[in-house]
Amino acid sequence: MKRLGQVVIAGLVVLAVALPFIAANEFLLTVGTVVALNIIGATSLHLVIRCGHVSLGHAGFMGIGGYTAALTLTRLGWPFPLDIAAGAAAPALLALLIGPLLLRLQGKYFVLVTFLLGEILRLGFVQWSGLTGGANGIFGIPPPSPAFATPAGFYWLALGTALLCVALVARVLSSGIGRVIDSLREGERLAQCSGVPVLQVKVGVFVLATALVGIQGGLMAHYLHYIDPGA
């Protein structure tokens, strides 16, 4: 059964890679690109949920990544790989700073506080108009490079990034760290009594998750050539 699952997954990946050759339709490629980008965000959110938390502020971290990538590109002139790296680093740094406090919360308290955090970030994007363009957002964000300016080119970029993120998360969850993460979800107190550094593990997972969703935000800004607080 496991072998069959691997074959099915490999077949789906091959089909996804070959989509531009099978159906060179701009609408289908647009849908495929959006799906691939959202796979990155869903995979990163899965890391947080795997620890036993439900975050409603994930879109705020995605926004930080998108704005950081857009601003470092348009105002500082950073090249494509560096602006995406900055888009990943900015939300990860915020997660590292607030994670030790935020991840002490449990259940509905964590949900409510992350919802509040997301709203604070959204309002910050609106009010800090000198930097973010306010409600109007930032226009004219160029594609990463001429090779990715076409629908097929950006689709492959988004798909490749999504596959790398999924592979990274799968590797983490299938390792010893993954078993520790599962132990936190099943019984945090028991894991702590067994010597697991609960808070440190949670913060590390939170930082990785926000970095991944920051990559999604940066790529989304490049793809839409525009970013605003609503997006």
Image (cartoon, rainbow, N blue to C red):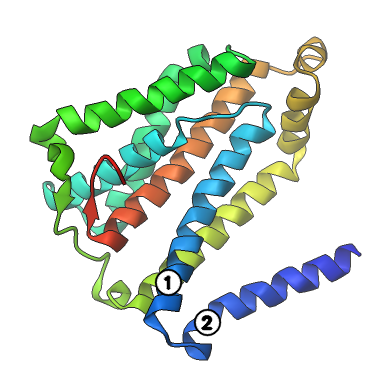
Q: Does label 2 or label 1 sit earlier along the sequence? A: 2
Residue at x 74%, y 18% (from the top left corner):
196
Q: Indicate whether 193 appears above or below 69.
A: above
Q: Is residue 143 left or right of residue 41?
A: left
Where is residue 24, by image quadrant?
bottom left
Asked whether disc 2 touches disc 1, contact meaning CB atoms under 8 Å apart, the reply is yes
* Residue 222, quarter of the rendered image: bottom left
Other residues around mark 2 within 10 Å, as few (<14) / some (14–19) / many (≥20) = some
Note whether 10 is above or below 199 in the view shown. Answer: below
User: Is 73 placed above or below 92 here?
Assistant: below
Q: Secondary structure at mark 2?
A: helix
Please tell me the numbered disc located at residue 155: 1
> Looking at the image, which residue sits at the far right?
1
Which class describes the residues within 10 Å of circle 1: few (<14), some (14-19), or many (20+)? many
Label at residue 20: none
Residue 189, percent from left and from top? 78, 11
Identified at 75% across, 45% down, the residue is 174
Q: CA distance from mark 2 to mark 1?
A: 9 Å
Q: Is residue 199 left or right of residue 96?
A: right
Residue 83, image x and y in percent?
27, 50
Q: Relative to 189, is 114 on the left or the right? A: left
Q: Is residue 91 visible?
A: yes
Tell me the kind of residue under disc 1: Tyr
Where residue 187 sits in the image (x, y, percent)? 80, 19
Between 86 and 10, the one lying in front of the other is 10
> On the picture, is 187 further left or further right than 104?
right
Residue type pointed to by label 2? Leu
Q: Secondary structure at mark 1?
A: helix
Residue 11 image point, x, y percent: 70, 77
The answer to whether one can see residue 99 in this image is no
Task: Name the residue that disc number 2 marks.
Answer: 19
